[in-house]
């Protein structure tokens, strides 16, 4: 079984500043993928970024980047130059086989 | 493609009634997932199908819940009889899983907000 833990229930950040969300996971699989999803108030689930576990290079997608520490089973998300539209719930997720397991989520509030 | 389509968007019912949630995945996707989201338990995987076959239903809470996928373009999640604790947002998602590992993103529907009174 795999587990995903997000230890920060809520975080706030000033517009244009940087915030980092933590995520740890546990899996016995060698081949897996890691994801961050965003859920704004509209309820829609939106993929933010994806990391392949066999790649050491950290994934980057515009203002979003990850710090992937495989040995520590850590997968944090950094949001740079935060914008008001970044206000949402953020979920970390891990896939093993055909199952995607989500963490409990971190609510991010971007303040003007 | 219109994306994953779920219906209804909202459902309000009384305890004991049967509830059927519907999902149309993206054409060409071979994996379909049903998730339930609550404040207390977050996003829980209920069941997933691969090529229309249920692969893992260990997340289904109890016998009152059942899911079917009669063909590649349609799936249902049924609750009978419904209870107030079933109130949640139910998401359907689909993906193209190759090689036995989910390496592509899930495409989620807009969810069904279920309220059981």
Image: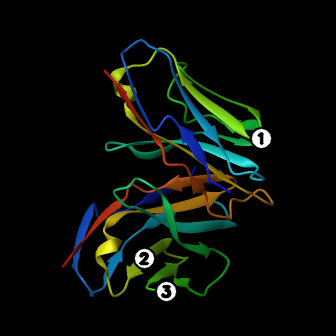
Disc 1 crowd, CA 10 A, few/some/many (<14, 14-19, 20+) = many
Spot occupied by residue B20 in the image (x, y as percentages of width and height): 54, 25
User: How far separated are the C-alphas under marks 2 and 1?
Assistant: 35 Å
Among numbered discs 3 and 2, the one appearing first in the sequence: 3
Q: Which residue is the site of mark 3?
A: A62
User: How far separated are the C-alphas under marks 3 and 2?
Assistant: 12 Å
In depth, the one of B91 and A34 nearer the eye is B91
> Given this view, does label 3 or label 2 mark the residue nearer the observer?
3
Q: Is residue B95 left or right of residue B60?
A: right
> Given this view, does label 2 or label 1 mark the residue nearer the observer?
1
Residue at disc 1, secondary structure: loop
Residue at disc 2, secondary structure: strand
User: How far separated are the C-alphas under marks 1 and 3?
Assistant: 35 Å
Disc 2 crowd, CA 10 A, few/some/many (<14, 14-19, 20+) = many
Q: Which residue is the site of mark 2?
A: A77
Spot occupied by residue B27 in the image (x, y as percentages of width and height): 75, 51
Spot occupied by residue B110 in the image (x, y as percentages of width and height): 49, 48
Q: Is residue B108 above or below residue A32?
A: above
């Amino acid at each position: 079984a795999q587990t995903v833990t997000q230890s920060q229930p809520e975080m706030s950040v000033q517009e244009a500043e940087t915030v980092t969300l933590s995520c740890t996971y546990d899996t016995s699989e060698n081949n897996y993928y890691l994801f961050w999803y965003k859920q704004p108030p509209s309820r829609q689930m939106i993929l933010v970024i994806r990391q392949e576990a066999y790649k050491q290079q950290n994934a980057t997608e515009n203002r979003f980047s990850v710090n992937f520490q495989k040995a520590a089973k850590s997968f944090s998300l950094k949001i740079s130059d935060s914008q008001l539209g970044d206000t949402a719930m953020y979920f970390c997720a891990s896939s093993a086989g055909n199952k995607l397991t989500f963490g409990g989520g971190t609510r991010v509030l971007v303040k003007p | 493609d219109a994306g994953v389509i779920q219906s209804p968007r909202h459902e309000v019912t009384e305890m004991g009634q049967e509830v059927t949630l519907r999902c149309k995945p993206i054409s060409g996707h071979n994996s379909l997932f049903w998730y339930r989201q609550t404040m207390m338990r977050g996003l829980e995987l209920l069941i997933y199908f691969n090529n229309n076959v249920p692969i893992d239903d260990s997340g289904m809470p109890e016998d009152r819940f059942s899911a079917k996928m009669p063909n590649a373009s349609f799936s249902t999640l049924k609750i009978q009889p419904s209870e107030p604790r079933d109130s949640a947002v139910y998401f359907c998602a689909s993906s193209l899983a190759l090689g036995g590992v989910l390496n592509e993103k899930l495409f989620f529907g807009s969810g069904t907000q279920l309220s059981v009174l």
